[in-house]
């Protein structure tokens, strides 16, 4: 199993990408499978880190939460940009202590944080597990720290441990 | 050319494309108007999230209805945009932070203590 399919997730993603780009047919399915198998075998040489998705069933929940949050903050930031009086808004940096140390989890968290308008990932220290964020509309520092920790980090920890 | 596009699909496509384009426009206005670099960094995110999503959803609806089969390769654009934006954004943010710290600006936080040895 692991000799033929060293990275099953990568193989599946490559096949899905092939079928999305070329359309689904028996021929494309065979060709895509062959290419996906060969490409993921080549990846062995690079030894990428292999995430263990123990709580994979929580992934749809995470995606739903993130899509809804991105929508909400799109509207919020659009309102703030169009507001005439820019001096009323305070933006600033916050430091979030993280329990998440898995590189894949941190990469996903980085995608979530940067994709959400209003928060930007600025710096991360792996020795201290601290994350420096810039928040566009910083009213309450504790609110943002709690948002990152209880809304995203908790789920990511459950998915990846 | 688009004679056989039903009204509901035309309306939905129009709404989604306008939504995406509108959000992207607001993001661009923000890029022009906001006072500091770190604040300007947030504005284009509108275009790279629901701005892109609106236009892509419009494209999915339009081409799926026109060709009467699901066209979903736009999903790949969304996936790659989401996966690559953090790289650019972090590069820009850290470059700005490095510049501001080198200049001794008080508006940016200090380095985390583990980096202290090379703090200027």
Image (cartoon, grey):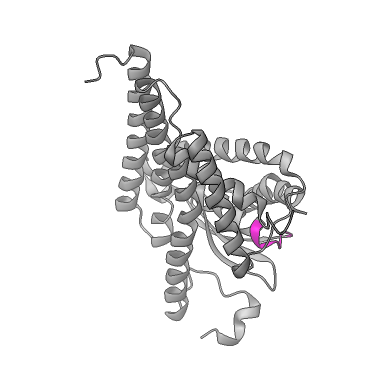
Residue A103 picture location, percent across and down: 65, 62
Residue A20 picture location, percent across and down: 47, 39
Tell whether A127 sits left or right of B75: right
Q: Is residue A121 above or below residue B104?
A: above
Q: Main secondary structure of the magenta part?
A: loop
> A113 or A87: nearer the eye?
A113
Tell whether A102 sits left or right of B55: right
Residue drawn at 38 percent across, 50 percent down: B44
> A89 or A157: nearer the eye?
A157
Magenta residue check for A102: yes
Residue drawn at 57 percent across, 63 percent down: A42
Q: Quadrant of residue B60?
A: top left
* Part of the protein shown in magenta: A99-104
Tell whether A157 sits left or right of A112: right
Q: In this view, does A18 lie above or below B107?
A: above
> A92 or A112: nearer the eye?
A112
């Amino acid at each position: 199993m692991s000799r033929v399919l060293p990275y099953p997730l990568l193989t599946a993603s490559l096949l899905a990408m092939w079928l999305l780009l070329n359309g689904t047919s028996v021929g494309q399915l065979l060709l895509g499978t062959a290419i996906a198998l060969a490409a993921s075998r080549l990846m062995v040489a690079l030894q990428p880190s292999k995430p263990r998705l123990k709580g994979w069933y929580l992934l749809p929940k995470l995606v739903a939460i993130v899509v809804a949050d991105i929508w909400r903050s799109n509207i919020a930031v659009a309102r703030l940009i169009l507001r005439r009086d820019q001096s009323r808004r305070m933006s600033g940096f916050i430091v979030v202590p993280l329990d998440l140390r898995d590189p894949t989890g941190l990469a996903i968290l980085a995608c979530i944080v940067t994709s959400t308008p209003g928060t930007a990932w600025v710096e991360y220290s792996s020795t201290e597990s601290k994350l420096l964020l810039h928040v566009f509309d910083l009213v309450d520092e504790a609110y943002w720290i709690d948002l990152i920790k209880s809304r995203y980090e908790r789920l990511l920890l459950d998915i990846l441990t | 050319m688009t004679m056989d596009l039903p009204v509901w699909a035309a309306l939905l496509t129009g709404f989604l494309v306008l939504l995406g384009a509108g959000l992207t426009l607001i993001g661009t206005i923000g890029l022009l108007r906001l006072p500091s670099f770190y604040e300007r960094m947030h504005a284009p995110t509108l275009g790279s999230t629901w701005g892109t999503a609106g236009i892509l959803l419009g494209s999915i609806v339009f081409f799926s209805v026109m060709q009467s089969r699901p066209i979903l390769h736009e999903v790949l654009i969304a996936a790659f945009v989401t996966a690559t934006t953090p790289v650019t954004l972090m590069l820009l943010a850290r470059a700005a932070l490095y510049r501001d710290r080198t200049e001794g600006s008080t508006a940016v936080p200090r380095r985390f203590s583990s980096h202290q040895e090379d703090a200027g």
